[in-house]
Image (tube, rainbow, N blue to C red):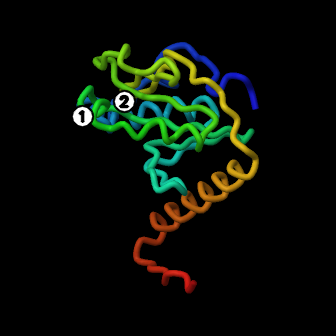
Amino acid sequence: MSDTPIPPTAGLSAEPPDADDDSFALVGGAPPIFRGVRRALAFRGFSSLMEFRLASGRRADVLALDTNGTIIIVEVKSGVVDFRTDQKWPDYAEWCDAFYFAVDEAFPTELIPDECGLMVADAYGAEVVREAPLRKLAPARRKTLLLRAALAGAGRLHRIEDPTFRQAPPIV
């Protein structure tokens, strides 16, 4: 695991936008931030899942993993009201190696606590404005999170590929 969770790169996007992509950029709020963050993470070697439920019951907006097993959580904030009314973010620190907020360019970034990483995103990518402090997870928790992420990703892919399949709940 490196000292820097997300290697810095220049610019907001990994590649120029497609002509067909422009309609998405006109959507406001969280969707363009989510897309930009996930694109930037992928460009930096991370695979991500949205709305990932942690064992604590909290749901991370974006959980990202790389081939070294680094786990990042990104909390997307679509505006000041969203940020001020949602104070669950301190609970995420024990579930990741690095925690970031992601906002759009209109968000007053001085509101984001100094102990958190910060990304500014649009529909095409994200720039890391402030790196998150690296806090290494305990090996047992990392293993559990990696397994749960693999199972969640495989389950989501299965539902996309076979939408009519319904699995019976496990017998406990």
Q: Tell me the element at label 1.
A: loop
Query: Which label was assigned to residue 88?
Result: none
Residue 129 placement (x, y as % from top left): 49, 15
Q: Quadrant of residue 85?
A: top left
Residue 116 placement (x, y as % from top left): 51, 24
Please give left or right for residue 151 compared with residue 75 in the image: right
The C terminus is located in which quarter?
A: bottom right
Q: Residue at x 74, y 39 (%)?
A: 68
- The one nearer the camera, 3 or 111, is 111
Please give left or right for residue 28 compared with residue 52 in the image: left
Residue 118 placement (x, y as % from top left): 47, 22
Q: Quadrant of residue 125?
A: top left
Please give left or right for residue 8 compared with residue 49 in the image: right
The N terminus is located in which quarter?
A: top right
Residue type beneath disc 1:
Val
Residue 65 placement (x, y as % from top left): 63, 42
What crowding class fits label 1: few (fewer than 14 Cα within 10 Å), some (14-19), or many (20 or more)? few
Query: Which label was assigned to residue 123?
Result: 2
Q: Which residue is label 1 attached to?
A: 27
Q: Residue at x 57, y 24 (%)?
A: 132
Q: Tell me the element at label 2.
A: loop
Residue type beneath disc 2:
Ala
What crowding class fits label 2: few (fewer than 14 Cα within 10 Å), some (14-19), or many (20 or more)? many
Q: Residue at x 47, y 72 (%)?
A: 162
The answer for how far apart the CA atoms under marks 2 and 1 are is 9 Å
Q: Is residue 49 above or below residue 18?
A: below
Q: Quadrant of residue 72?
A: top right
Do the residues bearing badges 2 and 1 touch, measured as CB atoms within 8 Å?
yes
